[in-house]
Image (cartoon, rainbow, N blue to C red):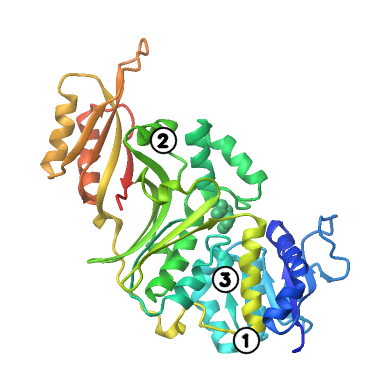
Amino acid sequence: MQQALRIGIAGLGTVGAAVLTLLERRAEALAARCGRKLAPVAVAAKTRKPRRIDVSRLAWFDDPAKLAASPEIDVFVELIGGADGPALRCVETALSSGKSVVTANKALLAKHGMRLAELAEKNGVALGFEASVAGGIPVVKCLRESLPGNTVTRVCGILNGTCNYILSRMEIEHLPVAECLADAQRLGYAEADPAFDIGGEDTAHKLAILTALAFGTRIDPDCIAIEGIKDLSLADIEAASELGYRIKLLGVAERTAAGIEQRVHPTMVPRSSAIAQVMGVANAVTINADAVHELTLIGPGAGGMPTASAVVADIADIARGLRAPPFGLPVAALASLPRAPIQMHEGGYYIRLSVYDRPGAAAAIAARMAERAISLESIVQRRRPGERGKPAAVPVVLITHATYEKLIREALAAVVGDGFIAEPPQVIRIERE
Ligand code: HSE
């Protein structure tokens, strides 16, 4: 048997601890599959507090950068997190000193992925990041290793377990966002700063990585239009349900006539669609491509063990000597395709307005839509709030047929200017497929 692969792990949080547990639990099976042992030899973490896992037999580093530079390891596993700072320094150090790197850090890759992939190529080592997107779902390998015979036209998915968990509980248990988020944090799903989850940035980081893999393009996170779930209300979730939809936070990247469109936003999907059935912390990714047509992967999108499963898969590839270019093509061959601005997005829209219940209000709103050839599928005035002493404002929900984002925004600016509405409009895009 070949020499053991020596592994150093930086970061002993939920995922780091789970990686050590899996490497121990599956030690024999992994050695048999890889033809060599996968041996954790060192760890680095901020504090030496008591932990559920025993690390007493492993070398301890207070400074992860020293672990990254150590000649005693072959693979550096980065589970520190953060787009810059120690995570970036350590990964650069490890790659520059000829070590392969495995990371779950989507923020790091979205910001520095191109440079780090170049560094890996230059040093002839691997940069594995299966765990960075969709937790336990092997979507990175799927796009990179399993679909080179396809031209991908669209990648779309639920990429944040925390948000899907929150939206599911809001719908089923009618709970507010804050209470659901606190549970997601307790269960180890949320980011260290959960604003990245609910603000949509975490989904955007993952979408940036998937876009590069799917379309063979350079990562460009600034081209993603991002809206999170923080402005969603129970009223929207209930209205969606009554109209036959469910709201999901989706990341979508697709080829359009104007270029590649990348967007992250709450989305109304038909309740009968496959993606609407994905509840709780689960993630789902649908890939549309010419040869396979449509492929959907569903599985746990966050949490220690599912994410550790993906980390261990990358370590196993390194142990076997398998090494693809990190983004499927050498970095120099990745394209810079034109990016389609969100204003060019074409689709249906849900619009919830809080309208003063006065003669002519509905007609004025419909007129503003008609001026821009926006066709309405339905317009529903829901009920009177009956609050005394305040001008009566009633919720009016519009569903449009397919139109352009630019026209919707122009029409709503005009509706606001007409003075019939009491609050800023709520707009949610609809995906009907
Ligand atoms: N906070 C992330 C999520 C963790 O909820 O999906 C997995 O990337």
Q: Residue at x 16, y 33 (%)?
A: 366
Percent position of residue 155, x then y: 38, 63
Numbered disc in front, either 3 or 1: 1
Q: Residue at x 71, y 75 (%)?
A: 30
State the CA–CA distance, disc 3 to disc 1. Answer: 16 Å
Number of on-image labels: 3
To which quarter of the image does residue 179 belong? Answer: top right
Q: Residue at x 58, y 75 (%)?
A: 128
Q: Judge by depth and name the residue closer to the eye, 192 or 12.
A: 12
Q: Judge by depth and name the residue closer to the eye, 383 or 144.
A: 144
Q: Residue at x 84, y 71 (%)?
A: 58
Q: Name the residue under label 1.
A: 321
Percent position of residue 154, x then y: 34, 64
Numbered disc in front, either 1 or 2: 1
Amino acid on which the number 1 mark rests in the picture: Gly
Amino acid on which the number 3 mark rests in the picture: Phe
Going from the N terminus, do you reach mark 1 or mark 2 first? Answer: 2
The quarter of the rendered structure image containing the N terminus is bottom right
Amino acid on which the number 2 mark rests in the picture: Ile
Q: Give the number of the disc on residue 339.
A: none
Q: Tag 3, which secondary structure?
A: loop
Q: Give the number of the disc on residue 129.
A: 3
Q: Name the residue under label 2.
A: 237
Q: Mark 2 and mark 3 in contact (Cβ < 8 Å)?
A: no
To which quarter of the image does residue 16 belong? Answer: bottom right
